[in-house]
Image (cartoon, rainbow, N blue to C red):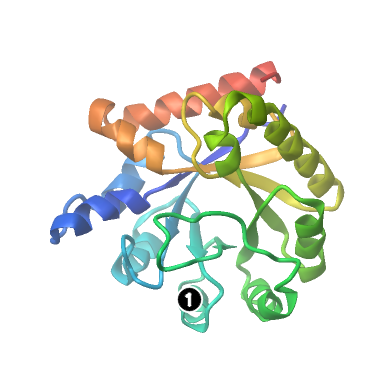
Amino acid sequence: MERIRLGVNIDHVATIRNARGGKFPDPVRAAKLAALAGADGITAHLREDRRHISDEDIERLSTEIDLPLNLEMAPTNEMLEIALRHRPHAVCIVPEKREERTTEGGIDAARQQQRLAPFVRQLNGAGVRVSLFIEADREQLDAAVALGAPVVELHTGAYCNAGELQREEILQALRRAASYGEASGLEIHAGHGLTYDSVASIACIPEIRELNIGHFLIGEAIFVGLEQSIRQMRNLMNEARKAGVS
């Protein structure tokens, strides 16, 4: 199987910094450590309320790191302007509600095509690779194709949070979606809520090209350090990919 890429989300380094104010810990330093530990890209979500990543963080990430930057953003005019100014390697369009603690699910591309179309069109036109964060559903995959988004990221939160009886059913839905999406011409990514215990079953899905993982890695770093937490995740992904079984 092809090697699967790991994108490290550094949002919650900024969460810790913002809890007290000031400059530490520095998300850009975390991004540089992630590169040393084997990350293939850096993901950062600039939220409307700036609860973690800031505009300055995006500015510095755009100029100070060598890895591809994946900017997560809601489909708003403010975020589009920021993305077009910085032109990151990729933009992942996500739903966003101010009252949520974290992104709670995929964006409804099937019912928001008219709203999303100008964002996808302008980002594509600027040479930014567009991804849609969606549920593992054929209707959503078809909508991504219709919109012209070359990439989708399948939401794995439900799988990670499910009990044992539901997990296999959700995993099968993710497998079907990955297969159908790739056959439709999409590049398939996945992410949200993945841990050491849940990553293998997702990493071994052959159509998935990239996983984006953040919160667990930052939390584990408290105990073992950021480089070690990322290296362990990278190793588990590699082993699962090589084995090709869950």
Q: Is residue 61 above or below residue 189?
A: below
Q: Considering the image in quadrants, where does the N terminus appear?
A: top right
Could you tell me residue 126's position as x and y percent? Answer: 62, 75
Query: Which residue occupies the foreground of this view, 166 or 206?
Result: 166
Could you tell me residue 20's position as x and y percent? Answer: 13, 57
> On the rendered structure, is 54 left or right of 196?
left
| Residue type (three-letter) at the residue carrying disc 1 | Met
Residue 2, by quadrant, is top right
> On the rendered structure, is 161 left or right of 147?
left
Could you tell me residue 234's position as x and y percent? Answer: 49, 28
Q: What residue is drawn where x is 31% and y is 67%?
A: 54
Q: What residue is drawn where x is 72% and y is 64%?
A: 149
Residue 129, by quadrant, is bottom right
Q: In this rendering, does residue 66 appear at all?
A: yes
Q: What residue is drawn where x is 73% and y is 80%?
A: 114
Residue 240, by quadrant, is top right
Could you tell me residue 90's position as x and y percent? Answer: 57, 61
Q: Is residue 36 above or below residue 140?
A: above
Check disc 1: other Cα within 10 Å, few if <14, some if 14-19, many if 20+. Answer: some
Count every numbered label the image shows and give the total: 1
Q: In this rendering, does residue 207 appear at all?
A: no
Query: Which residue occupies the foreground of this view, 48 or 119?
Result: 48
| Pointer 1 residue | 79
Where disc 1 sits, the SS reads helix
